[in-house]
Image: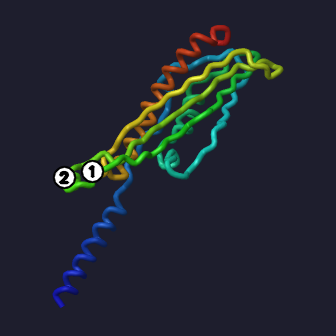
Amino acid sequence: MKKNASRLFGFCAIALLAACQANLPSEQLPDMTFKHLSLIQLRVIDIQLVSNFERSVDAPHVAHKFPVSPEKALMQWAEDRLQIAGQKNIARFTILRADAQEIPLKLDKSFKGMFKNQQSDRYDTFIEAQIEILDERNIRQASVTAKAEQSITVSEATPLTDRRKIWYNLVEKLMMKFNTAIENSITNNFQGYLF
């Protein structure tokens, strides 16, 4: 009888904890925008946004789990920063790669390892995008390409809510690197197409 009562109590305690956990509001992360950065005014009459990479939801790809995927961040960057300021030509912004991968790390399975909070996963993010200036015949007049990579490791004890914040910050840092790289390329190669 005592065994059944303790089992019932244990089950109720677990069920109660699970219910409390399920009702916790997920923390709302801010929208990732780039409107605080100055506009890049291009001497073009239209801007096309294209994504040319193949998405995958199979391991090790995890971009679909991120609050803001690298692809979405790149699209937002283009929408917020690129501006039409011309009477002819077309600018085409093309995403060539926008990926995030989860790489399991080797854990110390020894007795000592059981008492450590170990780094269990590494998240690697990669982006690459191109901006082309095309004339009225669709012939390329100028182009720039930029890429960026950013990684971080997390411990096995990191809950999902904290991982979501880590993923958000990871993509934010990735985009800062990309922004610096593409700005430098634009300055050096688009002299005749900047307003």
Residue at horizontal 32%, vertical 62%? 21
Residue at horizontal 68%, vertical 22%? 132
Answer above or below: position of 165 versus 94: below
Residue at horizontal 33%, vertical 52%? 159
166 with respect to 76 (left or right): left
Mark 1 residue element: loop
Near mark 1 (Cα within 10 A), the count class, few <14, some 14-19 or many ≥20, is some
Answer above or below: position of 26 versus 170: below
Kindly identify which residue carries mark 1: 108
The amino acid type, in three-letter code, at marker 2 is: Lys
The quadrant in which the N terminus is found is bottom left
Outermost residue, bottom direction? 1
Q: State how far apart marks 1 and 2 are (Cα).
A: 8 Å
The amino acid type, in three-letter code, at marker 1 is: Asp
Q: Position of residue 172 (x, y in %)?
A: 44, 33
Q: What is the image's colouring?
A: rainbow
Q: Position of residue 146 (x, y in %)?
A: 56, 23
Q: Where is residue 169 in the image (x, y as percent from the top left)?
A: 40, 36
Number of numbered discs present?
2
Outermost residue, front direction? 110
Outermost residue, top direction? 192
Mark 2 residue element: helix
29 with respect to 73 (left or right): left
Nearer to us in this view, 123 or 33: 123
Answer above or below: position of 56 versus 142: below
Outermost residue, right direction? 137
Answer above or below: position of 185 versus 107: above
Nearer to us in this view, 152 or 104: 104
- Disc on res. 112: 2
- Evaluate if marks 1 and 2 touch, with contact meaning CB atoms under 8 Å apart: yes
